[in-house]
Amino acid sequence: MKRIYSDYQSLAADPDIVAMYIASTDSLYVENSKPCLENGKHVASETPLGVNAEPAKILMALAQGLIGEVQTVKAHFSTFG
């Protein structure tokens, strides 16, 4: 069944979704990751968890005791010309 979500909070609340890949900017990462963790999703980040250590501390504290897990995925894209 095809599903369409009007916002990421609805997607995060879907019990059939087990993991979320967050590719938002650093400034929105906590805001976008929080509902995912609160709904027990595993979270993978395309970017650093924030512009300094504070956002990472917030997310790690939120993940403590929850089902979800936070991972950072570092990808390098190079263009050779």
Image (cartoon, rainbow, N blue to C red):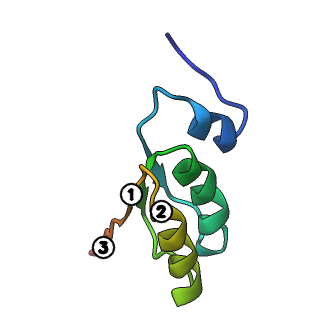
Q: Residue furthest bottom?
A: 52
Q: Earlier in the sequence, mark 1 or mark 3?
A: 1
Residue found 56% across the figure and 30% down from its top: 14
Q: Is residue 15 left or right of residue 44?
A: right
Q: Residues within 10 Å of mark 2 (few under 14, many from 20)?
A: many
Q: Amino acid at mark 3?
A: Ser
The reply to whether the C-beta atoms of the residues labelled 1 and 3 are less than 8 Å apart is no
The secondary structure type at the circle numbered 1 is loop
Q: Quadrant of the C terminus?
A: bottom left
The secondary structure type at the circle numbered 3 is loop
The reply to whether the C-beta atoms of the residues labelled 1 and 2 are less than 8 Å apart is yes
Residue found 72% across the figure and 32% down from its top: 6
Residue found 45% across the figure and 59% down from its top: 65
Residue 51 coordinates in the image, percent (x, y): 57, 85
Residue 67 coordinates in the image, percent (x, y): 42, 49
Which residue has dot 3 on it?
78
Residue found 59% across the figure and 66% down from its top: 29
Q: Earlier in the sequence, mark 3 or mark 2?
A: 2
Q: Earlier in the sequence, mark 1 or mark 2?
A: 2
Q: CA distance from mark 3 to mark 2?
A: 33 Å
Q: Residues within 10 Å of mark 3 (few under 14, many from 20)?
A: few
Which residue has dot 2 on it?
63
Image vertical order of residue 67 relative to residue 7, above or below: below
Residue 7 coordinates in the image, percent (x, y): 71, 39
Q: Amino acid at mark 1?
A: Glu
Can residue 52 be seen by looking at this rendering?
Answer: no
Q: Amino acid at mark 2?
A: Ala
- How many numbered callouts? 3
Residue 16 coordinates in the image, percent (x, y): 46, 26
Which residue has dot 1 on it?
69
Which mark's residue is nearer the viewer, 3 or 2? 2
Q: Which residue is more in the foreground, 6 or 56?
A: 56
